[in-house]
Image (spheres, helix red, strand yellow):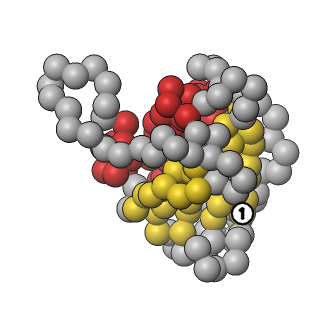
Amino acid sequence: MSDPLLQEDRLDYTPVARSVPLARHRTARLVAAWGHPELAGDTALVVSELMTNALLHGSIRGRLIRVRLTATSAALRVEVSDPRGERVPCPREVTGDDQFGRGLLLVGALAEQWGVGPREGVGKTVWAEWGVAVAPCGAVPLVGVKE
């Protein structure tokens, strides 16, 4: 994103299952508060899928998973970073009987674009992005929201 940031939030989570719903709910609240309630559900589901992937495939004991949300006048972006840079996610073909493997297909269906890149330091960042219009004047950022 080349536009200046209007909103930003980042929070580190321990690599445990209860972090996934915490990140999902926080994302939905922030996106709605930032003036994009129509995207709150999609962004929350994408964060949930990316957090689950990071937990299952990218976590290392004692290392945190970071969720970062940003908004500019043109785009809303979610990023999930984990310490396992060598494990790059890619969508896979699944059949009707497969119980797992659809997360990135959901991300691709819900986000306008998504990708993966190196994390600052060690690891990788998986991101998803949506184009947006300028948030209404009444949108107030939530800073320091407690879970």
Q: Most extreme residue toward the left, as rendered?
A: 96
Disc 1: CA contacts within 10 A as few (<14), some (14-19) or many (>=20): some
Numbered disc total: 1
For image coordinates 75% across by 42% down, the residue present is: 11
Q: Position of residue 17 (x, y in %)?
A: 59, 20
For image coordinates 75% across by 26% down, the residue present is: 62
Q: Is residue 66 above or below residue 35?
A: above
Q: Is residue 31 something one can see in this rendering?
A: no
Residue occupied by mark 1? 7
- Comparing 79 with 131, the one in front is 79
Q: Quadrant of residue 120?
A: bottom right
- Horizontal side of 30 relative to 89 (left or right) equals right
For image coordinates 54% across by 69% down, the residue present is: 75
- Comparing 138 with 73, the one in front is 73
For image coordinates 48% across by 40% down, the residue present is: 87
Q: Position of residue 71 (x, y in %)?
A: 63, 65
Q: Is residue 98 something one can see in this rendering?
A: yes
- The kind of residue tagged 1 is Gln
The N terminus, quarter of image? bottom right
